[in-house]
Amino acid sequence: MPRSIRQRLLVFILALTFISWATIAYTNYSDARHEIGELFDAHLVQSAKVLLSLVDAELYEEKFSENGDNGENIRLKEVEDHLFKHKYEKLLAFQIAVKGNTFFFSSAGAPGQVLSEKTSGFSSNRIEGKLWRVYTLQDLPGIITVRVAEPLSVRNGLINEIAFNLIIPLLIGLPVIFLLIWKSVDIIFKPLDEIAADLQQRGPAHLDPITIGNVPTEVRPLIDAINKLFRRLDKVLQNERRFTADAAHELRTPLAGLKTQTQIALRTRDIKKREHALQNILKSIDRTSHLVDQLLTLARLEPGLESIHLENCNLSRLVSDIVDDVMPFAAGKNITIDFRNMRSIQIPVHTHAVSLLIRNLLDNAIRYSGYGGHIDIDLSEKDTGVLLQIADSGPGIPRELREDVFKRFFRANQTAETGSGLGLSIVKQIADLHHARIELGESGQHGLQVDIFFPNNAKSV
Amino acid sequence: MRILLVEDDEILGDGIVAGLREFSYSIDWIKTGKHLHSALLSTDYDILLLDLNLPGESGLNLLRNLRNSGKDLPVLILTARDTVEDRVKGLDLGADDYLIKPFDLDELAARIRALIRRDHGRTSPLLTSGGIEMDVARHTVNKNGTGIDLSAREFSILHLLLESAGKVMSKRKIEDSLYAWGEEIESNTIEVHIHNLRKKLGQDTIKTIRGVGYVIK
């Protein structure tokens, strides 16, 4: 099957037209053939009957008034004369035989030999290279035999003419249909060609929706889908652009710090000042590395996780592992971490992403809890999902800022602690990927409490 | 000259403070905009260095509020945002200059000098009065063509007096512009510095207005 719609349409429609027309034409042709045959045959029968009654009447008219064989012969002669006077259709031939072949008369168009050996009914015979349709009729005593014949070419000529008339419309019609299909395909596809031209001249960032115009209804879903894809791409692209710009700007501040501190280290003669500057450079490099890590994490999370598969993960084990990891940092600030409910809770998650989420939340809790603070972690199984709660004893986040903190590079706390401003963006991103709900509230210790609820039916990431 | 820095990044802030001290500026550093207003009320700063991206608030808002409350000290914006839009917005809101991170300490110092010069209505980078010539950028002082060595504090006091030549500077004002918060000052420090300056530049260069302060004509 050809790939082109135009070719498919042409093949389909032309084949269908041809088949349906051929069926109709053949039926018409055989009907006509049958009817014409019957008509012509009827004509032969009629002629034979007329001829027989004519000969019969001529022969016996005076048979009873005048006896003798001689009279009969005279009568037959008269029949012959009479017949010559009749103007019969040239195409019709007949033969009359009386008493075997004692009298034999053949019409002008008829061949010399006997048209048919049959004594009655129809027959088709080839005589002197010509096909004849013959009807034979005998009178009751079997004395007179009349044979009426007509060359088959007469009726065949008519039938052929009818057949020809049936073929004519097809011969004209098929090319017309061909041209119409050719043209209409052009017309139908013109809007698509326009769309193709529009798309062709677009740059990679030109993602305006395609104007639908007079696109065929059948193509609308495709255009709608493309437009929908464009909208999504546009959003991703804008996000990406903003993210890159934000990231670059965010890196400028630590770079400025590094530059300033380096200049001081280079120009000061005071060893203490130089050492202080170098320490600051080291600290800044560590922080900038952390910022870069967070940026990479976010960039990797951005589009890619849609296709990841979830694996069953023991969430309580994961939380305790991460608590172990961060313990040294907490201990450094004399912060205690309390993780209740060690019962095994299995849920399908992307383990690495969720461990990043928990790690970021715990890092924040430790960063803001202050010396001697306390962090409570609670993991519990609800009817509809699993709830993870992390509460700290830090300054908390004012209600009016609880929406903004998920924005990238937004830093709510005006404390000496400087984070990357990306931690909660990462948390939100991962929560969204798992269709998990995230809520910020006030903990019992007037710090921040983060509730993350993983619903049971979130398997379809 | 006394400078106020608003910058939330610890390492950059520390660097700016240390760097500008090398240029004999006394500099106070606050990390959020929260205390900006009270800082400006308590001390007479010569210039404000303002970071735009502060946690929880916009430096541009701080600037708008500052100008609305009638403060007209020179403001130099430090920012990571470099689009024309950002710059125009900052300048329209009343900033006097704009420096994009990361910047060079020398450029920062040069822009501070230029802003202070402009604030005092000067166009020449040289401060001159009665045969004394000060090149702030080069940190040099000449008296009638011969170079004179001054300590950092002496230079700062002379700079202040020359910058406001003809105007009497109170002892308090001189102290304020010389010492940042937390620096200990002996009560007669200024007198000692003035005494030394007079020794180096000539007794009649700096006049004492009794009960008011000091002045260079």
Image (spheres, grey):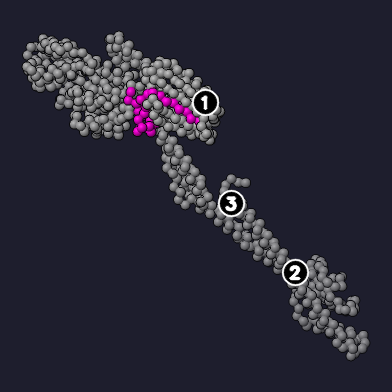
Location of residue A277 by image quarter: top left
CB-based contact (under 8 Å), mark 2 and mark 1: no
Label 1 packing within 10 angstroms: few (<14), some (14-19), many (20+): many
Above/below status of B183 relative to A87: above
* Residue at the extreme bottom of the image, as rendered: A65
Question: What residue do we see at 19% from left, 29% from top?
Answer: B71
Location of residue B66 by image quarter: top left
Callout 2: residue from which chain?
A
Q: Earlier in the sequence, mark 2 or mark 1?
A: 2
- Which label lies toward us, 1 or 3? 1
**Where is mark 3, residue-wise?**
A9
Question: What residue do we see at 85% from left, 73% from top?
Answer: A120
How far is mark 1 from mark 3, CA to CA? 60 Å
Which element type, helix, strand or loop, lies under badge 2?
helix
Question: What residue do we see at 42% from left, 32% from top?
Answer: A439
Q: Residue A315: give its label.
A: 1
Region of the chain picked out in magenta, as a range: A386-415
**Residue A399 magenta-highlighted:** yes
Pointer 1 and pointer 3 on the same chain = yes
Magenta segment, prevailing SS (helix, strand or loop) = loop
Which element type, helix, strand or loop, lies under badge 3?
helix
B77 with respect to A104 (left or right): left
